[in-house]
Image (cartoon, grey):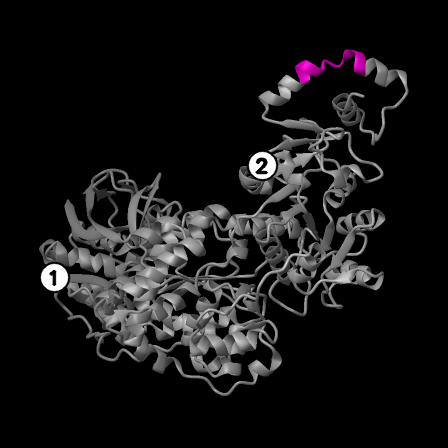
Amino acid sequence: MLARTITHAVVGLEARRVDVEAHLQRGVPGFSIVGLADRACQEAKHRVRSGIASAELEWPMRRITVNLAPAALRKEGSGFDLPIALSILAASGQLPRDRLRGHAAVGELGLDGRLRPVGGVLAVAEAARRAGLERLLCAAPSGAEASLAGIEPVPVRHLAEAAAYVRGEAEPEPYESPTDHAPEPRYLDLADVRGQERARRALEIAAAGGHNLLLAGPPGTGKTMLARRLPGILPPLDVAEALEVTRIQSVAGLLDPEQPLVMVRPFRSPHYSASVAAMVGGGPGIRPGEVTLAHRGVLMLDELAEFQRPALEALRQPIEDGEVAVARAAGRAVFPARFQLVATMNLCPCGARGDPAAECSCSPQRLGAFRDKLSRALLDRFDLVLAMPRPRAHELAAGPAEPSSAVRVRAESARCRPPAEWAPAAEALLDRAVEQVPLSGRGRARTRRVGQTLASLAGAQRVETSHVAEALSYRAPRELESS
Amino acid sequence: MNELALATFAAETGTHLVGEPRDRRFAAFVRRFDVAAYTESLERADVRWCPRTAHEFPPLLRSIHDPPPGLFARGAADVELLRRPAVAVVGARSCSPYGAQVARMLGRELAATGLVVVSGLARGVDGEAHRGALEAGGATVGVLGCGIDRDYPAAHRELAARIRESGVVVSEYPPGVEPAPWRFPARNRIIAGLSGVTVVVEARERSGALITADLALEEGREVFAVPGEITSALSAGTNDLLRLGATPLTTSKDVLDVFGIEVGPAADPDLSEEGVKVLARVRDGPAGADELVRATGIDAGALATALTELELAGLIIQGEGLYRAH
């Protein structure tokens, strides 16, 4: 007796179709799973067997072979439990075999037969819809997430419920559509930041032009506080972007079942001990890295100079291309990685530089090594670089500041404007600066980009000298470059 | 007298020699020493040798009480360059942004008037003084404390090459001599000896720059010290010098007066209204951008424009987020 259930395996962020076939033979009772199943997948044997018993269904005393096809695709995770159980039940005649046509199934079984949600349901649902399937059997908490893909979810809480549905004895419970009542995303507000006019201005420019921003200064000047407020002044995610973010967070297992559609711009701030694999993705199962988890949002690297140099260098390509190709023994995947980078750092290893009240105790060698870590190539990726001195006490007593909402309106309208023309005087000033400062080719392109954003922010028809001059003031200071 | 043999013998034996020693070791060394072959090897390495008996040898250096047997030199400029009026600008290796700024400014302004800027190619103040002189298109001389063929410190390899393009790098040590701590005070006597005036920009207590200043004072040369903050350890040495009677340096004009050089006052270029306001505030003392926003009432964007205008005009410079008048 043979029965088949369709499911999908997540590879990177994509899902590939997997047919779960169960075959029952006469002979010594046994249960084997074939088809490049990993450990979590092999353990399905125990969960499926207990789950079927708990659902008060019968475990066939036959030789059971489950094949996960295509056999060459590496399968991992616990999402195969439900399709395996359904295939076995169908093969043993406890469920009608033809009723599963047009269905895909995904979900993990508990020993009590309850269904648990798994990661990557959105990716599975999208792939199933593309394959022409109409319904997806999944754990109840995943129903809303699956519905985002435009497929009809069949959310079930227990294997017995799934069996009843397949027999045609029960209809699925209604689920709540996640787009109906998405609450306004909440972010940290810029109104909490006192003083720091120049840094606030730079943050606004970063939001208006999508520029990468580096804040350098002694500890305790509010660098991190400012950086954390960038997502709140970026324009809200549109639906297509929200789906991309949701798919990533679903695969990474970060999704909140209460809020299946992520409307909040991601903010990732990995610790400086992060490895290359943690940064760009990888590991045994090719998991998305921090650059992908920050897709459509902000990647903040606090204490930039403390990161391992290979981890920093690995960022260069995703910054440039907006995606990262990860090739590992387990396979190959291309992850989206269109993030905005915000970094903070001290001006020297001991942190005293830039603080008039402290004296730097770093040796020239140590300072040199510290600066060497930021290769010029990486420094070149920051359009905006800001040295922030320690504010004096009276500056912190400044009045309440503008809230994020006001800044976001300006940044959004700047994003909507068409690129401005360049006034000849502005070009001339840039040429002069290239000679005098001096600026590298990349530095020049960077200044041009920021100048363009400044003109848009000002609502100007043309990029004027004042915009170029302001753009030049955000270039990397000489003291950050290795000597 | 064979100065080349004396110089190589001193370097090989690691001794500080002014005259020829009357011992057998030296006599044996001279007998073995092949002047022609050695001179040829120097030529191959593009190194020139200027003995202290030569006419081109800088007379100021010849007049100190322990002049070197001669100088090895590399660079585009003639050794004659060393005979021109020269100013030594020396100071701490780990200097503050203030020290770096002053050193660069002095290097630039002194070299612009035709003075030769002499320093030790070290990190910090020395390097900045050389860079300032190069910026002004002026002449600068680097004095090494190791063999003439060495790039020390390695971080200044490129700077040394730039100095050699228009100026000259000299050392009393022949090719192959490793840098050693005890050679640096000896190097400092050459820096002081070459220069009519020595300026100490920033120095901790008991630092190498103070040795240079002492040597200059012993030879009766003028010594200037740049006043620094009394709370900074980097100013302890210079402030000590001031207490001992060194002349405080507040503008490069103080040095130019010693040489009888006069320059007309530079006119401020046409500045925007904001530029004038910001410059006035920065001239009262270094300030961060946010302080300037509050003091002038100009918003952060327009302030950034004004700051770049002033920076490009060479009127202010930025270091670690603070803006200072130049």
Q: Name the subunit of mark 1.
A: A
Q: Which residue is mark 1?
A: A134
Of residues B141 and A171, which is closer to you in this image? B141
* Secondary structure category for the residue under label 1: loop
Q: Residue at x 69, y 33 (%)?
A: B56
Q: Is residue A113 visible?
A: no
Say yes or no: labels 1 and 2 on the same chain.
no
For residue B73, the mark is: none
Q: What secondary structure do most residues of the magenta stretch adopt?
A: helix
Q: Is residue B170 visible?
A: yes
Dot 2 falls on which chain? B
Find the magenta span and give its range. B30-38
A181 over A24 or under it: above or below: below
Is residue B1 located in the magenta-colored stretch of the structure?
Answer: no
Instruction: Decide: is B116 above or below A349.
Output: above
Label 2 residue SS:
loop
Mark 2 lies on residue: B77
Q: Nearer the viewer, mark 1 or mark 2?
A: 2
Judge left or right: residue A96 versus residue A422. left
- Which residue appears at 20% of the width and 62% of the height? A137
Height in image: A119 above or below B269?
A: above
Q: How many marks?
A: 2
Residue sitting at x 33%, y 52%: A320
Q: Is residue A120 left or right of residue A205?
A: left
Residue B128 location in percent, x, y? Answer: 61, 52
